[in-house]
Image (cartoon, rainbow, N blue to C red):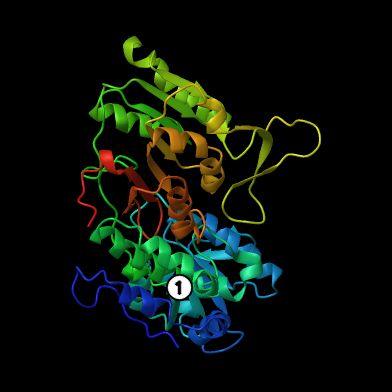
Amino acid sequence: MLVERNPRDGAAGDTSSSDLERLLSEAVADCQKREQTAFDAHSGAAHAPIVLLGAGQLGRRTLRALERVGRPAVAVADNNAALWGTEVENVRVYSPAEAASRFGKVATFVVSIWRAGGTHRYEQSRRQLHELGCERITSIAPLAWKYAEEMLPHYCLDLPHRVLEEAASVRAAFGLLGDARSRLEYRAQLRFRLLADFDCLPHPDQEPQYLADGLFAYSDDEDFVDAGAYDGDTLRSYLSSRDRFASYTALEPDPPNFEALQRYVSSLPSDVASRIELLALAAYSSRQRMRIAWSGSAAAALVSADGPPDPSDVECVTLDELFAGRRMSFLKLDIEGAEPDAITGAAAVIRRDRPIIAVCVYHLQNHLWRIPLLIASLVGDYRFHLRPYNEEGWDLVCYAVPRERSLTSGE
């Protein structure tokens, strides 16, 4: 059985592979058994009542899943007073204090708050419920493992045994990391995927996402490609610290986001705006028409668009095609799980131009190791780094930096 060891134990600088091996030492069969029994172990009974803390998107999704498996939640608790006394997915919403008073001795309280864009951490909700007298408290992970067919994958949360099945790749990606901080982050992220240990994850960096300081040198003639440009948030960050660049190409297929991006660029000085190109396209592994699928998996995903064209269709293009006659020196990818497809579709230009790559590796469990390995298969002497930009596993970015532009020693 796996011996649970928090990476905070021992020296903060201990990033040896022995800790990685301890995490990977659990047998797959033992891990599968743990997945199926973890929630019942928390509950103390196979059919104990369930109360969710958190009526947001994940809470609602969980309520629907529990209804489908025939184990509906008895209540929802939420800190938003405007929801108290209402119903969410036909389940009554209470204040945390009232929910604890009614169900704290008999129910398992599942914290269904796990999202990007906030400062919440599981420990805060766990402490709140404990202080209110709740006796059985767990994160969303054990419940999701138990009902995996209905609840997983959900971004990087997935069944732990799948990590162990890819242990060779996990080890190989660890060996690519170019600094002690990245190795520490990798082991914490791996521990989170294996054990749902929310406490082990470091707090996020405060610098702008995708634009890390101290890892690489910017050039005054940067040709920046922003795939998943959203409303221009990365462009804003980029322009706030530098106005010398050759070109900035922003790809954003979502119409409302693209319109917001256009409005922002139109507000810029003409000498800056003239170097920015906006494309209502998605980067992918082939040129085709796709659709965004919101059901079946929690993460939005591109799927083939069959039948007649639809207004919601997304036009996909390879970056190899788009940049066949143009230079790319910096590539940012945040495209809701399609990052490996976009890298595959940019293989030729990555080999040719050796751009710095800043890519999200949290949309799926195995992106943590598969994406660095994919990039390394294209260019053999990149240095790889991990930096978190949100709490609890969200907005984790892998930087792949060509050696000639690296500011690190490669240690």
Q: Quadrant of residue 66?
A: bottom right
Res. 256 visible in picture = yes
Q: Position of residue 164 (x, y in %)?
A: 50, 74
Residue at image x 37%, y 63%? Answer: 174
- Residue at the extreme right of the image, as rendered: 307
Residue 130: image quadrant is bottom left
Q: Is residue 253 above or below residue 304?
A: above
Between 343 and 52, the one lying in front of the other is 343
Secondary structure beneath dot 1 equals helix
Give the image quarter of residue 144: bottom right
- Residue 112, image x, y percentages: 49, 65
Q: Name the spot of residue 410 as percent of width and height, x first.
A: 24, 53
Residue at image mark 1: 194
* Front-lying residue, 248 or 239: 248
Query: What amino acid type is highlighted by mark number 1?
Result: Leu
| Residue 308 drawn above or below residue 176 | above
Q: Is disc 1 surrounded by few (<14), some (14 to 19) or many (20+) residues within 10 Å?
A: many
**Image quarter in which the C terminus is found:** bottom left
Quadrant of the snapshot with the N terminus: bottom left
Q: Nearer the viewer, residue 36 or 42?
A: 36
Left or right of 107 in this view: 217: left
Q: Nearer the viewer, residue 128 or 14?
A: 14
